[in-house]
Image: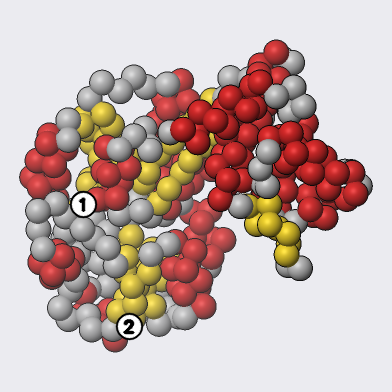
Amino acid sequence: MRGENRDDNQIERNTAVNIQHLIYAVEVEKMHSISKAAESLYMGQPNLSRAIKELEESIGITLFNRTPHGVTSTTEGAEFLKYAKSIVDQVTEIESIYSGERKEKATFTISVPRASYIAQTFTDFVKNVDVSQSFEFNYKETNAMRTIKNVDDGSFSLGIIRFQQNFEAYFTAMMEEKSMSHRELGSFSYLVLMSERHPLAQKERIVLDDLSKYIELSHGDPYVPYLPFSDVKKAEDDAQLDKRIYVYERGSQFDLLSEVCSTFMWVSPIPDVMLKRHGLVQRKCEDATRVYKDILIFKEKHKFTELENEFLDELKKCRKEVFSEVN
């Protein structure tokens, strides 16, 4: 604690220390090089070296060790620079406030399953954003358990989780435990997604046994609260399908489906524009009887923002359009 007080007092009482010197020192630490820092600061290296030397003399400590490979902070220097960076950040903040440059930034955060109709919703939502305003959006595709964690720890305001209807009680129990509210978006049975060049693409009637010759792509993280992962996998995987590749993001799945014509995947209905883009078709499977649900989750006292309501309106519209195409 004595060292902290000493550094604070030194900065405050020594008139030879100025903000510009602190900016220089912070940049040198960031770049680990006086020459690179000088280039970043648009100044000559000799002038920067002189300024750093003046700062070191004024505070009575050596900030940096010079080596042939650059510079590193000394122990005392690292402690001093921690406070210097804090001061520089505060000055920058003050300047932005009083120069009229600071604007209210709109934010939108949502954690979702790897579902194409939701991705299409987000795309349509972004198309309508006013780009003259400041904003920051965070859209993350992941599994249901990670989404619950994301909403619970506050890193995301909204979440959409997907689960097999048989597991609904487990998810409901976890949401109650974490004081979360939820809203059902809808239920559905999976379709079979495949290349338009797949041997089954033109088959009028597809049953589960038809798929046994081909490679199933599957998302490999179908976690369910309170249940062993092995039990969940048994409930999700079809025993008669023994050729399987696990993927964890939609980019890879579309590449595989488009390029490897012997692959297929169980999916929620996909927008027609995406099917055409990747040369894919979706088909019903007569004995695919599992029912899945998409659920919107949020904290109990959450107040929906204007942006969130706009997204949910777009989601409702997109879902209605996409799901009606396959009914």
Res. 3 in view: yes
Q: How was the colour assigned to the protein in this rendering?
A: secondary structure
On screen, residue 55 versus residue 260, left or right, reads right
> Residue at point 73% right, 59% down?
66
- Mark 2 burial class by Cα count in 10 Å: few <14, some 14-19, many 20+: some
Q: Whole-percent x and y of residue 197? A: 48, 77
Q: Which of 147 and 256 is in front in this view?
A: 147
What residue does disc 2 label? Answer: 214
> Residue at point 44% right, 68% down?
253
> Residue at point 28% right, 31% down?
298
Q: Whole-percent x and y of residue 133? A: 65, 24
Q: Whole-percent x and y of residue 286? A: 21, 66
Quadrant of res 65: bottom right
Quadrant of res 237: bottom left
Question: What is the three-letter code of the residue carrying label 1?
Answer: Phe
Question: Which callout, 2 or 1, points at the residue further toward the start of the chain?
Answer: 1
Query: Closer to us: mark 2 or mark 1?
Result: 1
Q: Whole-percent x and y of residue 261? A: 45, 80
Q: Nearer the viewer, residue 206 or 260?
A: 260
Tell me, for residue 129, which label it has, or none: none
What residue does disc 1 label? Answer: 163
On screen, residue 14 versus residue 199, left or right, reads right
Res. 129 in view: no
> Residue at point 32% right, 42% down?
150
Q: In this view, does 48 lie above or below 182?
A: below
